[in-house]
Image (tube, rainbow, N blue to C red):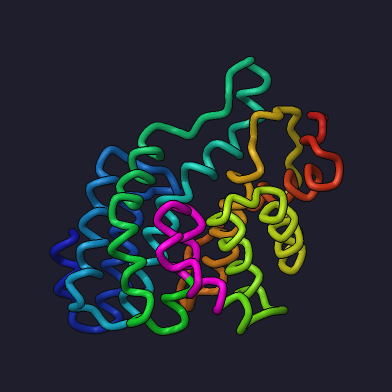
């Protein structure tokens, strides 16, 4: 299926094959055993520099979406974890998928200067997810944040800057703000204080960046915004209702 995607001739063929791939390796936004290997191959497709910028954008969006399942799964399952007395954790294979994207992050971020604006937005999310690698493009992310100040893209870049610098509170505050600019997040209350602000900020950045991309993916982790808006004002998650 990955070979078929690489050989798509028309944009329609690409769209259909890309959708088939997503339904196979990320069905309903859930990582599978073959998701980690699939995202590794997808990243190599970008690095081979054989795709158009719009197709690379689709792949970047897929990589961000796969890597953010770790945060999404942890957050959306936090109420169940709290009820059963267990720490929040992602579904199986989500951590491996995140690690697979992280292993390619340095090479992906090294493409910053050669990518167009939409792809740089996706790379902003990559830098936010993997701040130790994001330090290599910290000045570029900061420049993007300054150039687009007052926009959602600029605020997402600013959150990435905070995460790269380890400024947890600032990242959380800005993430709560940007989440209010879009649709009202789904109601989701939990008393589980094990959800860290970094995880929530990462989730919101990925959600919002996905919405900015020409053909981004759905962002089922919108509940992160509901929790973070409360924790930034009270210092703790709201109690389960």
> Which residue is found at the position 58% from the left and 18% from the top?
86
What range of the chain is rendered magenta? 122-143
Rendered view: 89 above or below 134: above
> Which residue is found at the position 62% from the left and 61% from the top?
159
Q: Residue 75, percent across and down?
A: 60, 39
Rendered view: 157 above or below 234: below
Would you identify the image quadrant in which residue 123 lies? bottom left
Q: Is residue 137 left or right of residue 96?
A: right
Q: In this view, does 19 lie to the left or right of 167?
A: left
The overriding secondary structure of the stretch rendered in magenta is: helix
Looking at the rendered image, the quarter that the C terminus falls into is top right
> Which residue is found at the position 77% from the left and 35% from the top?
237
> Which residue is found at the position 24% from the left and 54% from the top?
40
Would you identify the image quadrant in which residue 240 lies? top right
* Residue 14 located within the stretch drawn in magenta: no
Rendered view: 40 above or below 81: below
Would you identify the image quadrant in which residue 20 lies? bottom left
Give whichever of 6, 181 is nearer the camera: 181
Q: Residue 14, percent across and down?
A: 27, 75
* Residue 127 located within the stretch drawn in magenta: yes
Looking at the rendered image, the quarter that the N terminus falls into is bottom left
Residue closest to the far top: 85
Count the marks.
0
Q: Residue 117, percent across and down?
A: 46, 83
Give whichever of 94, 175 is nearer the camera: 175
């Amino acid at each position: 299926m990955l070979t078929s995607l690489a050989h798509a001739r028309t944009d329609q063929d690409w769209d259909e094959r890309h959708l088939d791939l997503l339904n196979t390796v990320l069905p309903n936004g859930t990582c599978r055993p073959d998701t980690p290997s699939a995202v590794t191959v997808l990243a190599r497709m970008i690095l081979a520099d054989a795709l158009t910028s719009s197709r690379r954008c689709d792949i970047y969006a897929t990589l961000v979406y796969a890597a953010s399942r770790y945060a999404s799964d942890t957050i959306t399952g936090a109420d169940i974890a709290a009820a059963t007395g267990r720490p929040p954790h992602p579904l199986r294979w989500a951590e491996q998928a995140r690690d697979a994207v992280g292993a390619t992050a340095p090479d992906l971020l090294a493409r910053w200067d050669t990518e167009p604006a939409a792809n740089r937005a996706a790379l902003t999310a990559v830098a936010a997810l993997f701040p130790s690698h994001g330090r290599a493009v910290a000045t570029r992310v900061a420049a993007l944040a300054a150039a687009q100040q007052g926009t959602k893209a600029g605020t997402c870049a600013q959150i990435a800057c905070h995460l790269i610098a380890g400024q947890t509170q600032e990242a959380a505050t800005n993430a709560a703000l940007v989440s209010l600019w879009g649709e009202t997040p789904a109601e989701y209350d939990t008393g589980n204080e094990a959800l860290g602000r970094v995880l929530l900020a990462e989730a919101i950045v990925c959600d919002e960046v996905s919405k900015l991309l020409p053909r981004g993916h759905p962002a089922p982790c919108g509940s992160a915004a509901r929790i973070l808006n409360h924790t930034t004002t009270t210092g703790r998650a709201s109690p389960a209702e």
